[in-house]
Amino acid sequence: MPESLILGSTPSGRHRFHALDALRGIAAVMIVFRQAPRSLQRSFPHNAFLAVDFFACLSGFVIAFAYERRLESSQDLGQFFIKRLIRLYPTYLLGIVLGTFVFLLVQVKFPLSAVPQVRLALLIGVQLAFLPNLHIFPTGALFPLDYPAWSMFYQLLANVAYGWLVCKRLARSRLLIALYLISFAVMLFWSRKVDVGFAISKRQVLSAVFRVIFSFVAGVLALRLFRERPRRYFDHFSSTITAIAIGAVFFLTLSAPFAAMQTKAFHLFSAALLFPALVFLSAQCKLPSSWTPGCALLGDLSYPIYLIHGPLLSLLYLPRISQAFQLHPTLQPFAVPAVVLVSGTASYIALKIYDKPLRAFLTQRLKTLMHPAP
């Protein structure tokens, strides 16, 4: 059996799971529609917040695929953490800078007295450090300068915790299954709902920790099952049919057109079983070469769209813009697609001229520091 067709031997270097890239792009776009202002009076996808759980599951799968064996052998936790920051921080910084400008424009009423000025300066400093707002500025959001960033903060914590467990040889499947079951129990019996984590309260913060652990660990376990036994990828025809079916199920799950899909039970089912299954099956799809550029682009743009769309949507709350949509209801259906188009275009430009070049430079600098020339 050719090695390139065996899943267990798939190299973790630059391999891409293109079906998963496509799902990431779909999830990012659905999130934009979910976060649209209610004043637009449109029917938006009810379950799009579950994209956060999908992202966490996908992160666990991809991080374990790319780093688990290296962490077990030679790579230390510090290097792993720096690599994760290099991957996440440039786009996060762009979102915070854009978000700060919009926050000052939309939510801050000038002139400010001395105390609010200090609080605002502290808030900007804390957010630039990739840390949450814990009652520094009077707002209920953990990341008011770019509210979608709250989930990336928790994912980064999950990455570091997982890396530490692997480095210490503690990340055995039995422990991960125990963490999975405990997190599921907390979400089932203690958390009032699945859509938690973005606000400042003890229940929200603790629920968010278990929410992210739950989905992240599910992704790691899916990866271990993926690698457990050598098996073939689906052939091109089967991959195409499977990918289309997975995309349809995923879109239906996030849009939730039926009342039964809008319940906590279905939300937990999606995060606990459906998303890990979709990730596992998608990883076995070897898509036609004509599909891969589009899927790769969706995957590349998903992260910047996720962090850039928040500030752009906040502009819709400006009185003049909000009143314009109220006075001209025929314009309302075009508001969110316009945000998707603008954020997608901005993400593509940022990816090409800012994010990828900066990450390449920082990665090379890290390699030089790790392996200095003699």
Image: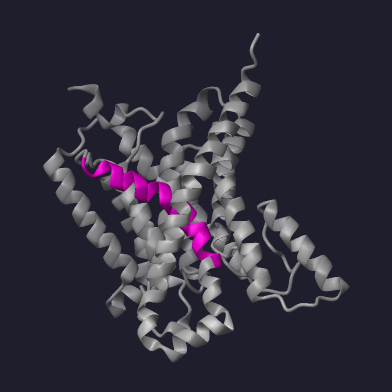
Instruction: Report the number of numbered marks.
Output: 0
Residue 168 is at least partly visible in this image: no
Give the camera-side residue of 147 and 283: 147
The residue depicted at 52 percent of the width and 76 percent of the height is 316
Give the camera-side residue of 214 and 344: 344
Q: Main secondary structure of the magenta part?
A: helix
Image location (x, y in percent) of residue 225: 33, 39
Name above or below for residue 12 compared with residue 109. above
* Extreme-top residue of the structure: 374
Horizontal arrangement in the rendering, residue 355 relative to residue 225 (left or right): right
Image location (x, y in percent) of residue 17: 32, 41
Name the image quarter holding residue 52.
bottom left
Q: Does the magenta stretch include residue 294?
A: yes
Image location (x, y in percent) of residue 50: 41, 64
Q: Is residue 148 magenta?
A: no
Q: In which quarter of the image is the C terminus?
A: top right
Image location (x, y in percent) of residue 68: 47, 33
Horizontal arrangement in the rendering, residue 305 relative to residue 83 (left or right): left
Q: In which quarter of the image is the N terminus?
A: top left
* Extreme-right residue of the structure: 114
Give the camera-side residue of 246 and 15: 15
Name above or below for residue 337 compared with residue 291. below
Q: What stretch is highlighted in magenta?
A: 290-311
The residue depicted at 34 percent of the width and 58 percent of the height is 26
Residue 319 is at least partly visible in this image: yes
The residue depicted at 25 percent of the width and 61 percent of the height is 249
